Image (spheres, coloured by chain):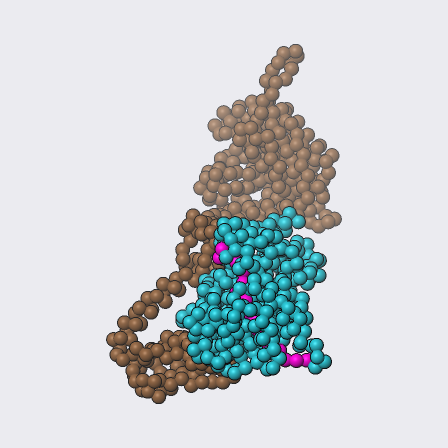
Chain colours: A cyan, B brown
Amino acid sequence: MKQEKINENLRHAIHQLMCEDEAVVVIGEDVREPYGGAFKINKGLSDDFPDRVIGTPISEEGFVNMASGMAIMGHKPIVDMMFSDFTTLSFDPLLNFASKSVTMYGDKLDLSMIVRCANGGYRGYGPTHSQSMQKYFMGIPNLSVYELSPFHDNYYVFNRMLSEKNPCIFFEEKIIYSQYRYENGVIDELFNYSFKGDHENWAVASIEENSVPDVLILCPGGLASMCMKVAEKLIMADEIEVKVAVPSKLYPCGIEAIIEDAVAAGKILIVEEGTSGHTWGEGIAVKLYPYLNKQKDGAIELLSSSDSIIPASKYYESQVLVGEQDIYESVLKLMKIAKEG
Amino acid sequence: MRPIVVPQLNANDNSCLIQNYYCAEGEFIHSGDLITTLETSKAAIDIECEADGYFYPAAKEQTDVRTGEVIAFVFESLQEMNTYKELSVGSATAESTASYKLSNQAEAFAALHQFSQQELSALNKKLIKLSDLEELLKQRIDGDEARILLSKNQKQVSKTVAESHKNIPNAFLLMKVYCDEALTGMREIGEQLEVIVGFGEVLPVLLVSIKDEFPLMYGKLKDEDTFIPAAEVNVGVTIDVGTGLYIPVIKAEHAGRIEHTAEIMMEYKYKALRSSFAETDLMNGTITISLNTSADVVSVIPIILPGQTGMISVGAVMKELVLKEGTVAERSYINLGLAYDHRVVNGFYAVEFLARLKSKLEHFEINV
């Protein structure tokens, strides 16, 4: 069977949605042929749906406002935000217009829209094109935050977002676009995965599904494949067994589905690419603590990128962003803490 | 070669289950023939052949396949099919050899101990850790462990020793016996009889001689309240010439006289060498002597044979210096031990008994 790349899956998902539902439109800069979007996710789309792929000027505030208005009128816009760094320009329409409109007028309004954002670093794009912007959008009423993952099928995820009937922002880690998806429950020779929780929100990767791991790693989809590499290294080199749990929806994010694994492991590492301070992981950690604080060697470790702007030099960028070695060392640290009590 | 692929299913499913194939591998099928049925969460979809040709299944029955995945091929000729088959089977077996992975530590350990692929795959683990192999190695060692079966004789010894330790609460008394006089006497008797005479030959004679003074040392405890004195003194003597431990018994009619005990002991030593004791040689002991006269043996604590009250132990002859009328002289001694059934006699009685034997040895009066 031919393995599917993540960007192919994303492209097919949007294409499929447009086939099935005429309300779905794509809006953004350079989304039409011959460009097809900065990361080619919209490739070929304007050929197939010439009236429903809307190219815009450089005007994030304007076209997100426009998309919000179309959503109120019953369209289902999928906005292509070329780089997630630019979402600051659309913060006002998302916070003050789209998300509020859902419950601002007495009756609940259906407002299905998705803002897709190419997100994250590791490409040497510098401080203005490398940020992980997720945390700025968490905690806003009626706004859901999702992230692209190698586990979750995007057709399923996009349907889920549209069925929420409120604005959703979808972060897509740029470095995983060209990676292959994990399919049919298999990651590689060693690791399998299964979905847990409502809407299959959590993908949990493990060597043996029912075994008790030494450490449970939680991370959004962008760093999932990095965590899987580390998981393989840990088991092969150190015989440390980890499970990796990856949610599709980051906010609001229920943890019920992974509590059992978390309590069994006792030691939790939460990894994310965003800079430290008021992170997604902090919120998850607070939710997990009541379940772990009775445990003898229960511990939660948070790992984020440094409290720094992201340098353009690849070397200095690697010093700032979370890397494989950081994840590896954090797990060893957790094991050491547990050992020493 | 025409592939047959899983069609677009529905909005909910992107994979489905292949039911059984309706045609066999290599069968010539026609356009429109039913090949298999795919089962999604909501419906069953029949898959039909689109062109005439030879059928070859690419996916296994009862497995999940995804939209767009190839289920089967239809080949124009059997030759084409066989060529494809050879190529695909070759790559499949190459994949199946690695059904497990080893951690780095486990891999080094497996190389060191040369575990076979069969041993490793028999573990039935996706990931083999060091601890798994340590367990495997332990089983391997246990399997190869050398075994020595106990001899028939030793099994009997084992039973007796175990029974003694279980049932008889023994006490032990050790006494020094100066034996220059006895050694001289035994040597003289030996020269006279032209046999070797030692404590094994002499002690039975002495034991017979003091029997009436110490009836409780000869006989057995019947129950908590009753001791049955032995009618006669049959003296067992331990003999081990390397063929196993035997305790032949010098019967009462011979035990009282040194020329008889010497003769019988000689006979028993030969029998021990040939392991040719008769059942009767080993029966009906009343009291037993444990001989441990190899150089430098200080003493042994013997067991008490079930049905008896005591066992006497004789250690090696030792020498010491002594002041005799102001001059330093050499003196020989043995440690004479007595294990006794504390239910029957106490220390006072045992001391009296052993002191009596000591005195008999130190004032040696046995004659032919």
Q: Which residues are magenta?
A: A108-124
Look at 38% across and 85% down and name the residue there: B48
Magenta residue check for A117: yes
Q: Is residue B366 magenta?
A: no
Residue A185 visible to the viewer = yes
Tell me what residue is drawn at x 63 percent, y 46 percent: B164
Residue B251 position by quadrant: top right
- Where does the N terminus of chain A fall, quadrant-wise? bottom left
* Along the line of sight, the residue nearer the viewer: B84 or B213: B84
Looking at the image, the residue that sits furthest to the bottom is B32
Count of marks placed on residues:
0
Q: Is residue A212 visible in the rendered structure shown here?
A: no
- Is the residue A28 above or below the residue A190 in the image? below
Query: Between residues B233 and B119, which one lies in front from this camera angle?
Result: B119
Looking at the picture, does residue A19 appear above or below residue B228? below
Of residues A317 and A82, the one nearer the viewer is A82
**Residue in the picture at 65% in, 15% down:** B323
Q: Residue at x 60, y 50 (%)?
A: A333
View extreme (top): residue: B326
Q: Is residue A332 above or below residue A120?
A: above
> Is residue B172 placed above or below A103 in the rendered structure?
above
Image x and y of residue A305, in percent: 58, 54
Q: Quadrant of residue B55?
A: bottom left
